[in-house]
Image (cartoon, rainbow, N blue to C red):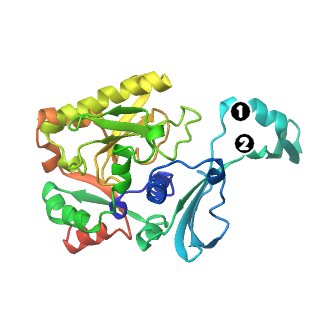
Amino acid sequence: MADVATKRELSSAETEAASREAKRAKADDKNGEEGGDEAEWENVLSTFTASRVLSDSAREKIMFLHGKIADDDAVVVLEKTPIREDSLAELFRGSKLRLEMKNDIYSSYRLQAPPHLNEIKTTVVCPATEKHVKKYQRQESFLVEETGEDYRAVTLPYVQEQSLSLQWVYNILEKKAEADRIVYDDPDPELGFVLLPDLKWDQKQVDDLYLIAIARQKDIKSLRDLSSEHLPLLQNIFQKGKEAVLQRYKLPASKLRVYLHYQPSYYHLHVHFTKLGYDAPGCGVERAHLLSDVIQNLQSDPQFYRSRTLYFPLRADDGLLGRFKEAGRL
């Protein structure tokens, strides 16, 4: 559920949820079929009217806008794409430079790159609900302490009441959408998973590699549901996921960070695979749990995550934070 999701301040973590919502909408509209060149370059934002900036980050070169497309509320995420090493020669050869300052050996320029090397990744959520708008708005965060009892009494009822549709997840598992993006597919109904690139990774360089492994089992919402009976599933994802990354991207396990989020951005078990050294969204200690640690904890205590006290940040406008306050837990 998006409102329960913990978001790193003004990071591309919001883009993860926004991208998935946009892809889900696209899948619903096109029944999972990919469009041709004409559809690919269609300007769906030609009628977009921005009403306000929800948040932005100059450091991460990302902006979240709220407005309307025709009569529908929409959230638009604009994010500068990374500079690719394999395009540097073309960038230097085909760009125009305007001198801004020169002082001794130091000079600065404004570089105008060729259009195809100067793209802005754009994610559209439309129609956007009030929940979407609030999710991308700058908010103060608070660290929550959740016991096992808190989860059962406070968090779980809220999740069951408020969770967003997971149809886009099922579309991926059933290959009704994004089938061409799948890196690895284990069809086993109990141990299987689908591994595919996160939508905010442009797949043009491995330095910011970001893949998601989505479990086929549909009854595991989050870390809290895991017990020792799920060890074969977790070990399968861990081992086969690393092997798939090595085969496709030539990255060994020693260069990977493999982890789960708690709270997750959506309540269907999924595991993140990112390149070590990439400051991926939500990889901080207050939200990320290494899959290797999760496996060892469950081997030591079969019910570890059902009783363990967990800590995670929630935004000021998050409804779950209000429930914790009402319960006297903050």
- Left or right: residue 103 versus residue 31 is right
Return the x and y of residue 289 as percentages of the image width and height: 30, 42
Residue drawn at the location 34% of the way across and 55% of the way down? 266
Residue drawn at the location 24% of the way across and 37% of the way down? 294
Quarter residue 7 falls in: bottom left
Q: Which residue is mark 1?
A: 87
Residue drawn at the location 83% of the way across and 45% of the way down? 109
Q: CA distance from mark 2 to mark 1?
A: 8 Å
Q: Nearer the viewer, residue 240 or 313?
A: 240
- Left or right: residue 204 versus residue 190 is right
Instruction: Note whether 61 is above or below 68 in the view shown.
Output: above
**Farthest bottom residue?**
71
Q: Which residue is mark 2?
A: 117
Inspect the image, locate mark 2, and give the three-letter code of the amino acid beneath it. Leu
Label 2 with label 1: CB-CB less than 8 Å: yes
Residue drawn at the location 24% of the way across and 71% of the way down? 323
Return the x and y of residue 148 as percentages of the image width and height: 15, 55
Q: Nearer the viewer, residue 233 or 72?
A: 72
Query: Is residue 291 visible to us here?
Result: yes
Return the x and y of residue 9 as percentages of the image width and height: 47, 57
- Left or right: residue 26 versus residue 142 is right
Inspect the image, locate mark 1, and give the three-letter code of the amino acid beneath it. Ser
Q: Nearer the viewer, residue 23 or 296?
A: 23
Q: Which quarter shows the N terminus?
A: bottom left
